[in-house]
Amino acid sequence: MSEFRRARRPEHVEARRTAILETASSMLRSRSVSDISLRELSDEVGLAKSNVLRYFDSREAIFLEVLDRTWGEWLDSLDLPASFGDGPFAREVAVATEIAWSAGTNHLLCELISVTASVLERNISVEVARTFKQRAAAHTDRLAALVRAAVPALSPEAAGHFAGAVFVIVAGLWPYAQPTESVRAATAELGMPAAGEMFQSGLTEGLVNQLVGLVARSAG
C-alpha cells in the first residue's frame, strides 16, 4: 500500500490505474455493478478507498473506464460477414445477426451498457463526463463505419442511427436477461424460454428490424 502512495512517475500511475480497472473487470464477471461498492473494490485491489480515489474520481468513473476499454476491445474483435445468402435483405440480416450475437455474448459489455445512464453517468465530474462522451461518440462512429462498409446501401446518417440503436437496445433488454430466482422459476413454470435465450432472440430481432428498416427507408 505504501508503494501505491509513492507512485509518481507517469508509467507507475498508469500501472496503478490498470490494476484497478482489471480488478473491477474481474469482479464484474460474477457480480453486477450495483453489487460492487468502492470499499469492496478497494479491498480487492489492496488499497484504502482514499488511495483508489487518487486515480479515479469515483466508483462510477472506474466503471466508465472499464466500459470504454471493453467497448473498444469488442469493436476490435467484431468481424462482420462478407458473404450472404439469398433472399430479400440477406446482407442486412446477416450483418445485424452477427452484431447481435457478438454483443449479446459479451456479458461485461452488456452489463456496463445497461447501467450507463442510470448509474455510471451519475456522481462523475464534468471532465470525466466529457471524456467518456467523446470516447463513446468515437466508438459509435467506428461501429457506424464498419456497418456501412458491410452494407453500402446505408447512408452515413442511417449508419450512425443504427450504431446508436445497438447501445440503446442492449441497455433496454439486458436487465431482463438477469432475472431473480423467483422470476426465473415463474417463467420456467409458465413454459417461457430462458431469460438468456429471450435476450438474444430479442436483440437479434431488434437489430435486424432496425437495419432492414433503415436500408428500406434509404432506398425509398
Image (cartoon, rainbow, N blue to C red):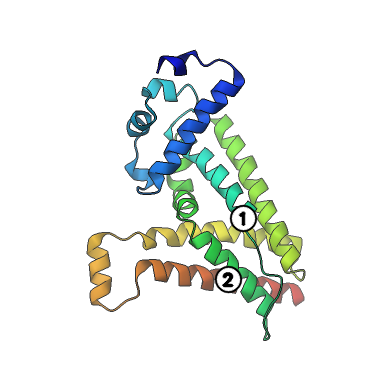
Residue 174 position (above or below residue 92): above
* Amino acid, disc 1: Ser
Q: Is residue 103 left or right of residue 2?
A: right
Residue ID for mark 2: 97
Q: Position of residue 85 (x, y in %)?
A: 67, 82
In this picture, residue 94 sits left or right of residue 100? right
Q: Quarter of the image for the C terminus: give it.
A: bottom right
**Within-10-Å neighbours for mark 1: few <14, some 14–19, many 20+:** few
Q: Which residue is mark 1?
A: 77
At 55% from the left and 33% from the top, the residue drawn is 128
Decide: is 9 above or below 210: above
Q: Nearer the viewer, residue 34 or 219?
A: 34
Mark 2 belongs to which amino acid? Answer: Thr
Residue 202 spot, x, y in % from top left: 47, 70
Is residue 122 at all visible to an observer of this figure? no
* Of 158 and 27, the residue lying toward us: 27
Q: Tag 2, which secondary structure?
A: helix
